[in-house]
Amino acid sequence: MGELLGYARVSTADQNPALQEDALYKAGCFKVFTDHASGSLTERPELEKLQDQLRPGDTLVVWRLDRLGRSMKHIISLVGELNERGVGFRSLEEYIDSNSPGGKLVFHIFAALAEFERSVTQERTQAGLAAARARGRTGGRRAILSTKDVARARELYAKKDMTVEEIGKMLGVSRTTIYRALEREVSTSPRRKAQGVG
């Protein structure tokens, strides 16, 4: 029997994770990893630490599904990865437990959705590359983005239909370039300047 490891996330520094953490410990988790959102676009460090510690037979437990990911696509992708690693998943509020017959069915559905997402992403990427070639860009990654491309990247990121990596592939740049461009937009926005930030 593997271990139960909990994951909690709060959206702002003002929110208290105690409710989530108490529920996770009560459910039997021997350790809980908690992320406090900072507004940065980078990965969540505590979730990464948790994923490093998970072993086949372990179960990742969350208080609610939306604590695991920022979008349904992200959640499906993460749960699919857990399934491939032989790691269980449990969501307390939605009563999802991969160790139960019903939970196993949900897991299989999530895995199928993740595979579907990968297929759609591949098709979308190929279409984006074809469109780029049609505009005269024959390949290779550019070091910078035009103002128009940054606006497009920001629009796609806000919709949450594509990952940052997918947006980068479509625009012909790396994921890091997209992150930097988006963070630069945030730090130089008129609202932040008015607040004296940046």
Image (cartoon, helix red, strand yellow):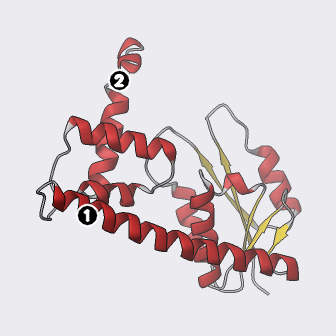
Can I make out residue 25 in this image?
yes
Category of crowding for the residue at label 2, using alpha-carbon neighbours closer than 10 angstroms: few (below 14), some (14–19), many (at least 20): few
Residue 193 location (% of width, % of height): 35, 17
Of badges 1 and 2, the one in the foreground is: 1
Residue at horizontal 40 percent and vertical 69 percent from the top: 123
Alpha carbon separation for disc pair 1 and 2: 30 Å
Amino acid tagged 2: Ser
Callout 1: few (<14), some (14-19), or many (20+) C-alpha neighbours within 10 Å? Answer: some
> Which residue is most to the front?
134
Residue 145 position in % (x across, y down):
20, 44
Residue annotated with mark 1: 129
Who is closer to the viewer here, 24 or 155? 155
- Mark carried by residue 160: none
Q: Which quadrant is home to the N terminus?
A: bottom right
Marks 1 & 2, CB-CB < 8 Å contact = no
Indicate the secondary structure of the residue bearing disc 1: helix
